């Protein structure tokens, strides 16, 4: 059984999909804790699914590095096999990467290396491309530049808005994440290889 800590900043739609997957007794992973960098709406999922949650508010620390150390201590306390950044809208500092990578994953709403950063969907629309995508990566010290574990194309349709396009990308992100967690748990995917 693979133990996961999932970190969020918002409503946690990817987290909900992952929690739903863990309800299947044959799914080889479980979420042992949900963490957030603010009072995120998605923390309520912890209560709904019976999973403990914690908050390490970014604003409570003098800088990113101090916040990162506090985050490491919280995550370590749960002893996870894998840490998933699921809509955590903050770059984790190098100490967090050094502590957990390559067992540190992030979903991203673009076909990397296209459109890294916080506004990937908006950037794809602004660029006028006819397709974008979703990616799952190992987190490193770059901005969305870590090893790519899985990705899939998503078409940009005429009249798409940032919301409509993002709504079509999210289910793909969820599927990529759930499939990868299953493959890591069953050793079909070795993250150490991706980090070489």
Image: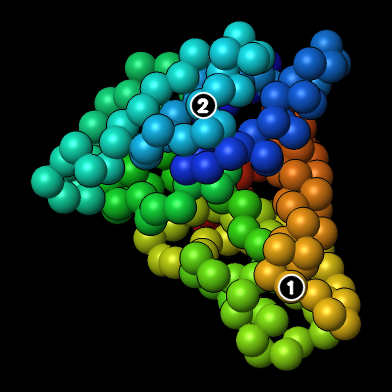
User: In the structure shown, which secondary structural element does the residue marked by tag 2 occupy?
Assistant: helix
Residue most toward the left? 62
Could you tell me residue 178's position as x and y percent?
Answer: 75, 37
Q: Quadrant of the N terminus?
A: top right
Left or right: 34 in relation to 1: left
Instruction: Answer with mark 1 or mark 2, whichever residue precedes in sequence.
Output: 2
Q: CA–CA distance between discs 1 and 2?
A: 28 Å
Image disc number at residue 161: 1
Q: Is residue 16 positioned above or below 157 on the image?
A: above
Residue 143 at least partly seen? yes
User: In the structure shown, which secondary structural element does the residue marked by tag 1 occupy?
Assistant: loop
Q: Which residue is more in the foreground, 44 or 115?
A: 44
**Numbered disc in front, either 1 or 2:** 1
Image disc number at residue 43: 2
Left or right: 94 in relation to 105: left
Q: Is residue 75 positioned above or below 180 on the image?
A: above
Could you tell me residue 8's position as x and y percent?
Answer: 50, 39
Residue 81 at least partly seen? no
Residue at left offset 82%, top offset 59%: 168
Could you tell me residue 193's position as x and y percent?
Answer: 60, 50
Left or right: 174 in relation to 118: right
Residue at left offset 67%, top offset 39%: 13
Left or right: 115 in relation to 90: right
């Amino acid at each position: 059984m693979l133990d996961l800590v999932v970190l969020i900043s918002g409503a946690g739609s990817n987290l909900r999909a992952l929690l739903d997957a863990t309800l299947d007794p044959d799914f080889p992973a479980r979420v042992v804790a949900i963490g957030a960098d603010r009072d995120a709406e998605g923390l309520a999922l912890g209560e709904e699914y019976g999973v403990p949650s914690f908050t390490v508010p970014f604003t409570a620390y003098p800088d990113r590095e101090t916040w990162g150390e506090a985050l490491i201590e919280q995550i370590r306390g749960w002893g996870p096999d894998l840490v998933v950044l699921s809509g955590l809208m903050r770059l984790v500092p190098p100490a967090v990467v050094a502590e957990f990578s390559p067992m540190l994953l992030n979903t991203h709403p673009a076909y990397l290396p296209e459109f890294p950063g916080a506004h990937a969907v908006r950037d794809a629309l602004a660029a006028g491309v006819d397709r974008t995508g979703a990616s799952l990566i190992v987190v490193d010290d770059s901005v969305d530049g870590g090893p790519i574990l899985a990705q899939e194309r998503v078409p940009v349709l005429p009249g798409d808005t940032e919301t409509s396009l993002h709504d079509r990308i999210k289910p793909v992100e969820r599927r990529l994440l759930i499939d990868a967690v299953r493959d890591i748990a069953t050793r079909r995917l070795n993250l150490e290889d991706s980090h070489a």
